[in-house]
Image: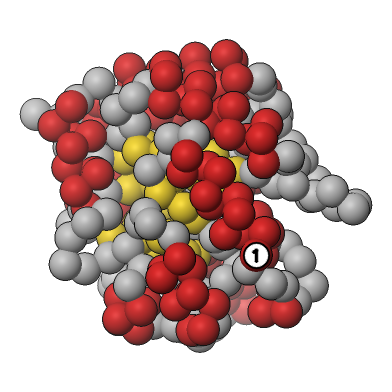
Amino acid sequence: MSTDRNRAFHALHHGDEPLLLPNAWDAASATALAAAGHAAVGTTSLGIAAALGEPDGQGSALVREATVALARRLGSRLTCPYTVDIEGGFGGGPEEVGRLARELADAGASGVNLEDGLPGRTGDEPLAPAGRQAELIRAVKEYAPGLFLNARIDTHWLVDDPAARPLDETLARAETYLAAGADGIFVPGVAGEEAVATLVGAVPAPLNVLYAPGRLSLARLAELGVRRVSTGSLLFRSALHTAVTLAGAIREGAPEDGAAVPGYGEIQRLAARQEG
């Protein structure tokens, strides 16, 4: 593990501007994002899972294996810090999740994203009990104290009307998770100015939100005091959309401009790039 990268990653959450964290799904996308000048890179569990033909958030052993393998590849390819989305710990208990965190830290990761949404997130109890989640957080900090632990709270994620949900439970969970050792709080699904401002004012740690196209801009989120803005699965979904759209255009004989598409040689150079 790199203590210098860990310190740099922690510092990015306390700078003059919020950290814009693009989320990659494989070594090529992560390397390309780092080469484009992003200060840090994250992974997206949906992107990794979908690329394997697996659903996201189900604690799949196959997705866990691919996540660890990607973290190892990135450790030898990136000079910038990177953080790993580990869903809810892939169904493991505190000791197992703690060991996973240490394995990722040893691979070179500077952070992990740990969510409290249960697999499927349906029914009357879509979230893990806050006390159980706190045990996972404590285990991560015990086994890998240098990692930036971003505690994701899913009170507003995959619900019918996120804006209508009160913030009381979100704030209570944030307090519990921070007391357990979390370094930051992530509340995806919150996109309204009033809710974001309330969270920033009430949470005594860097607040992470999910970028929502057409909603609050990065500049406005910065004004509200947000410290980290993640793209989540947006880049992966956009890449799929672009690929399908371009294939359709070629099939239909529509004109397309390939000038902006990276050439074969450029991708080869990115793939061969190692940490110096």
Q: Secondary structure at mark 1?
A: helix
Scheme by which the image is coloured: secondary structure
On the image, numbered disc 1 is attached to which residue? 168
Residue 92, position in %: x, y? 66, 21
Q: Which residue ends up furthest to the right in the rendered image?
A: 123
Q: Quadrant of the C terminus?
A: top left
Q: Amino acid at mark 1?
A: Asp
Q: Is residue 132 left or right of residue 66?
A: right
The residue shown at (38%, 43%) is: 183
For the point 73% across and 62% down, the residue is: 158
Give the x, y percent position of residue 157: 67, 61
Image quarter for residue 261?
Answer: bottom left
Left or right of 83 in this view: 138: right
Q: Write down the quadrant of residue 43 in the picture.
A: top left
Q: Is 55 situated above or below 246?
A: above
Q: Nearer the viewer, residue 104 or 194?
A: 194
